[in-house]
Image (cartoon, rainbow, N blue to C red):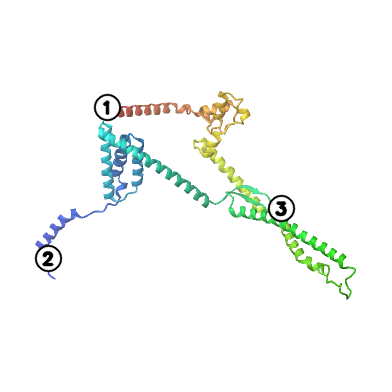
Amino acid sequence: VPLPTASSLAHRAEISRLISPLRRVRPKIPFYDLAAHRIPTLWSLYRGLLKHAERKNVKWRISTIFKRNQHTFQAHIAKEQLIQGHRWLDIFIHAKQGDARRRALLDRYDRMIAAKRDRAEFRRLVREALEEQARLRSRPPIFKGSFIRPTFYNKLLPRLVPQPANISGMIYKRRMGRESRFANKELIEGWVEDLKMESKFEEALLGPWWGGAGENDWDRVFSDNPRAWRTPSNEKLKIIQAALNRDYGRLSSDYPPSLLQAGANARRLKIQRFTRQRARERCGEIFASTLKRMRQGPPAHILEKMGPERRKMDRIIRGPGEAGYTAAVKIKMGVKLKNPELWKLEDGKKEDWARLDRMEAEVAAENERRRQVASEEEEQDA
């Protein structure tokens, strides 16, 4: 094969120089992770749409669309969505500046979105309720350390929350079985008593004539072999009595040491969990139990004797806080604080007062600057 000539090599180099810039280069970082995409989209487009929408239903629709499209990873689809968003932003700005046609359009759109928002809210509530039910069905029962004491229907059992259906079904069936056994026992004992009476009656009736060879010679039925008649009933009574003995055995059964130790461990873990939760409450977290405790009040006969000021203090001392005015009220009412010295640090340590004052001045200056910028923007829009 002959070597290419110099002119051929030059021609190939020229073609490579012209085509190389046209070759597609795949970026190593996806576009949705680039600051050049995220900052303008979130800070300019999204915040601008929420700022100029002015209608709560339209704002809800904008936030819903952005949440739905936040996982778009195809560049051409994201480009179309961004173009649509900037078109909406221009409409919102013109409507805010007084464009009557666009304001009427947004008002009609707001009314239309209101019905859609109600349906979406209803679907959300139904979905959350179904998810909660599914979570409760799949959640393993919680052992808090208490027990179901031994009865005729069960030995010592851990009290689980929620209680498994098989335990409830076992207790229910044993209770129904015990009631039916007493009814059957009473019925069978009545049959046995009837057999005894029939045997005595037949013995008294046939006693003087039985054993002869005349025409008045009758065969015995009940008194010939009374034990054979009573044997099936007695066997059934033995089975019933054995079941009743097992019931008494469950009632007087011993407590397994391993189960008692598991209950002690569960109670210790429960106390540790509540201790951690109270510590988190004092740090500012609010739980469902916190709100429930804060909504509680004294008994009715005590509440009616309390004045408005006393009722206000009662509501305050039920909160988890231990600083500021809450701590002062709790100390006044004699409530024991977890950290009695905490409320004294509300203004900070004395050696930090100068630094705190300087930080407060910086925050006030920044807030004033932002207010001026916002007022200038409003004047420009007007």
Left-right relation of 318 to 189: left
Q: Is residue 187 above or below residue 34?
A: below
Quarter that holds the C terminus: top left
Sooner in the amino-acid sequence: mark 2 or mark 1: 2
Q: Are marks 3 and 1 in contact (CB under 8 Å)?
A: no
Q: Are marks 2 and 3 in contact (CB under 8 Å)?
A: no
Residue 316 picture location, percent across and down:
54, 29
Single out the mark in the foreground, 2 or 3.
3
Q: Is residue 6 above or below residue 315?
A: below
Left-right relation of 108 to 24: right
Asked which secondary structure carries label 2, the reply is loop
Q: Residue furthest left?
A: 7
Task: Answer few, some or many: residues within 10 Å of disc 3's Cα (few below 14, many 20 plus, some between 14 and 19).
Answer: some
Single out the mark in the foreground, 2 or 1.
1
Residue 141 picture location, percent across and down:
56, 50
Residue where numbered disc 2 is placed = 4
Residue 251's tag is 3
- Distance between mark 2 and mark 1 Cα atoms: 73 Å
Q: Can residue 154 be seen by looking at this rendering?
A: no
Question: What amino acid is found at the position of numbered circle 1 in the picture?
Answer: Glu
Sooner in the amino-acid sequence: mark 2 or mark 3: 2
Residue 38 picture location, percent across and down:
31, 43
Residue where numbered disc 1 is placed = 379
Question: What amino acid is found at the position of numbered circle 3 in the picture?
Answer: Leu
Single out the mark in the foreground, 3 or 1.
3
Task: Answer few, some or many: residues within 10 Å of disc 2's Cα (few below 14, many 20 plus, some between 14 and 19).
Answer: few
Q: Residue furthest front?
A: 215
Left-right relation of 150 to 216: left
Quarter that holds the N terminus: bottom left
At horizontal 58% and vertical 23% (from top left) the residue drawn is 307
